[in-house]
Image (tube, rainbow, N blue to C red):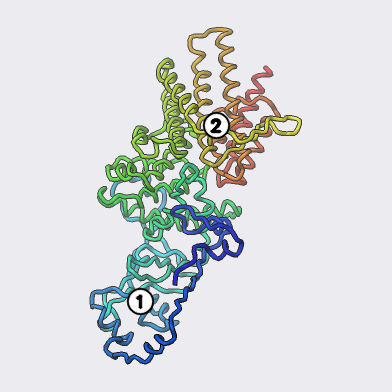
């Protein structure tokens, strides 16, 4: 028998069953939040009745068909790993209790991890063992896999997995064997994995057509506990913010487990560093970004920067795949810190030009080049360079070339103009997908920062009236690009990640807004952002209102 070509849901609705490359389920089931189920399609072969009678009457040799027990004993060896479920017709309800008692007798040292441990050890370097972390709901790294070397059955080797009740069960990830037991996720853990795949990964995958963070990272988590705990911590914190839960105990415990494994991995030689470690560090950095008020040390941001200095990580990223996607996400994180905290990007940018997705005509390549150009603009802006005729002119030329080279799919689908009487002080710009939205937002941000630099440079060689006129012109250009960026977020509300870049531009240029109605709309926009993405905006609102009040007071004097 073979499986049907369409899943049951698509056949019942008479829809075409389409699946993206690398996706575990079809588009229809993914949107509905259901699992794809392919039923077996029976096929019958017709034959003459006479031949059937001859076959029934033919005697069979007993030696040719051994019993199932004999077949297993004859094909298995003492060193062979087999599925223990074939030898156990029924699992005793006391198995989990007996094994839990055995595990309690073993002295397994657990540890508690805090940000102070990372602060006293530069990335990457050998790090001391932190004290223990006691949490009955979250397993320690040593109990992720429990493999028995001596089998309880004669002439067989078995894999013994830790069993416990569903509410306190550790995560049995299985081993790389032909037949491994199913994953023993609790209901809460399965829910957190779904939150990560369907909600959290939308922002990291906003510039990635292959959606590595939604498809590849969850698969990697089933093999690497360090990535799994990073996903659980990130999804738990996201769920706490979205549901306005005032307790972060669960996410902190998962994050501590991830940090514990992270410190152990960084204590090993650099030759052992790989994509799982890099992915876990970037996920931990996303966890840090959810707490804007506490995000001041950037431990994991510095850690990712140092990891990119190792040849093994760099070569893996240059070959494409998940490693490259993680590096581009790290560049997004560096840009966020640069714009919000007004500092130069602390990263070697030329390495990104060696990646596969930088050159090419794909939508992903166009977006990545726009991200790279913004990083270069920020580097020059916060470096205090005064060579306007060379560096800044070259950057403007590259931005012009990028805009002229974008394909037709990057053009605006529809734009609702500004209508103050209708309460719309910003345009509403509709785009084809999230890639086009991100590309234009980064382009407008680059243009706005170049104009802001001209305002700060005093107009170049102009003096008096000409200098004031040039400054006013640059300020109007900044407001134009800011309105366009907010319009992209308003017109593509299906994509929550579109709210990030306009808020970053408001950090730098929001003080230039003078119209009271436009100011109120900015505050409303930031309030909507806090409801749609896990990022607090009250600090930015307070900062803008303070700057507006001071400028208004100076204008009245």
Residue identified by numbered label 1: 102
Q: Nearer the viewer, mark 1 or mark 2?
A: 2
Measured as percent of width and height from the top left, residue 224 is found at 37, 58
- The answer to whether residue 542 is seen in the rendering is no
| Coordinates of residue 554 in the picture (x, y in percent) | 64, 20
Residue that sits furthest to the top in the current view: 464
Quadrant in which the N terminus appears: bottom left
* Residue drawn at point x = 38 percent, y = 41 percent: 302
In the displayed structure, 157 sits above or below 124; it is: below
Residue farthest right in this picture: 421
Asked if marks 1 and 2 touch (Cβ < 8 Å), the reply is no
Which residue ends up furthest to the left in the rendered image? 78
Would you call the spot at circle 2 few (<14 residues within 10 Å), some (14-19), or many (20 or more)? many
Q: Left or right of 155: which side holds 554?
A: right
In this rendering, would 262 be left or right of 552? left
Q: Nearer the viewer, residue 225 or 319?
A: 319
Residue at 50% over, 43% down: 206
Q: Residue at x 29, y 83 (%)?
A: 71
Identity of the residue drawn at 47% across and 69% down: 168
In the picture, residue 326 is in which quadrant? top left
**125 or 446, which is in the foreground?**
446
Badge 1 marks a residue whose secondary structure is: helix
Q: Is residue 474 left or right of residue 45?
A: right
Q: CA distance from mark 1 to mark 2?
A: 57 Å
- Which residue matches tag 2? 505
Position of 353 relative to 180 (above/below): above
Q: Nearer the viewer, residue 438 or 120?
A: 438
Q: Which numbered disc covers residue 129? A: none
> Would you say 33 lies left or right of 556 here?
left
| Near-viewer residue (343 or 412) | 412
Compared to residue 97, the image places residue 218 above or below, namely above
């Amino acid at each position: 028998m073979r499986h049907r070509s369409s899943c049951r849901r698509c056949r019942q609705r008479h829809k075409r069953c389409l699946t993206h490359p690398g996706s575990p389920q079809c588009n229809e089931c993914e949107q509905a939040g259901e699992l794809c189920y392919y039923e077996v399609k029976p096929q019958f072969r017709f034959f003459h009745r006479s031949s059937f009678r001859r076959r029934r009457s033919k005697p069979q040799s007993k030696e040719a068909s051994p019993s199932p027990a004999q077949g297993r004993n004859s094909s298995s060896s003492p060193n062979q790993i087999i599925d223990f479920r074939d030898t156990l017709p029924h699992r005793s309800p006391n198995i989990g209790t007996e094994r839990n008692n055995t595990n309690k007798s073993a002295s397994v040292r657990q540890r508690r991890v805090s940000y102070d441990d990372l602060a006293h050890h530069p990335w990457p370097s050998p790090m001391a063992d932190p004290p223990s972390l006691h949490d009955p709901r979250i397993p320690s790294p040593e109990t992720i896999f429990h493999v028995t070397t001596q089998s309880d059955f004669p002439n067989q080797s078995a894999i013994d997995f830790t069993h416990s009740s569903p509410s306190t069960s550790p995560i049995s990830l299985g081993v790389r064997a032909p037949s491994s037991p199913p994953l023993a996720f609790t209901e809460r853990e399965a829910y957190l994995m779904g939150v990560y795949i369907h909600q959290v990964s939308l922002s990291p995958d906003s510039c990635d057509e292959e959606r590595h963070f939604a498809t590849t990272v969850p698969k990697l988590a089933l093999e690497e506990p360090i990535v799994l705990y990073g996903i659980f911590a990130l999804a738990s914190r996201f769920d706490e913010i979205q549901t306005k839960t005032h307790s972060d105990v669960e996410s902190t415990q998962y994050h501590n487990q991830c940090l514990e494994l992270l410190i152990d991995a960084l204590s090993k030689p650099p030759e052992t560093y790989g994509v799982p470690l890099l992915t876990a560090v970037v996920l931990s950095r996303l966890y840090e970004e959810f707490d804007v008020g506490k995000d001041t040390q950037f431990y994991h941001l510095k850690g990712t920067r140092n990891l990119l200095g190792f040849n093994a990580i760099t070569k893996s990223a240059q070959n494409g795949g998940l490693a490259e996607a993680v590096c581009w996400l790290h560049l997004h994180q560096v840009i966020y810190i640069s714009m919000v905290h007004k500092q130069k990007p602390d990263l070697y940018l030329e390495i990104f030009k060696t990646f596969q997705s930088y050159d090419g005509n794909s939508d992903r390549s166009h977006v990545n080049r726009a991200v790279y150009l913004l990083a270069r603009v920020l580097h020059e802006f916060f470096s205090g360079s005064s060579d306007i005729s060379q560096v800044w002119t070259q950057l403007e030329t590259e931005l012009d070339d990028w805009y002229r080279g974008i394909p037709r799919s990057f053009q605006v689908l529809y734009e609702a103009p500004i209508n103050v009487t209708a309460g719309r002080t910003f345009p509403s710009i509709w785009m084809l997908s999230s890639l086009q939205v991100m590309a234009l937002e980064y382009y407008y941000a680059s243009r706005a920062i170049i104009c802001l630099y001209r305002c700060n440079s005093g107009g170049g060689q102009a003096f008096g009236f000409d200098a004031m006129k040039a400054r006013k012109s640059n300020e109007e250009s900044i407001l134009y690009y800011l309105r366009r960026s907010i319009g992209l977020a308003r017109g593509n509300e299906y994509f929550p990640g579109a709210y990030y870049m306009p808020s970053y531009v408001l950090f730098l240029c929001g003080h230039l807004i003078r119209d009271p109605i436009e100011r109120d709309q900015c505050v409303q926009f930031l309030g909507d952002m806090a409801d749609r993405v896990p990022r607090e905006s009250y600090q930015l609102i307070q900062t803008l209102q303070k700057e507006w009040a001071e400028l208004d007071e100076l204008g009245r004097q």
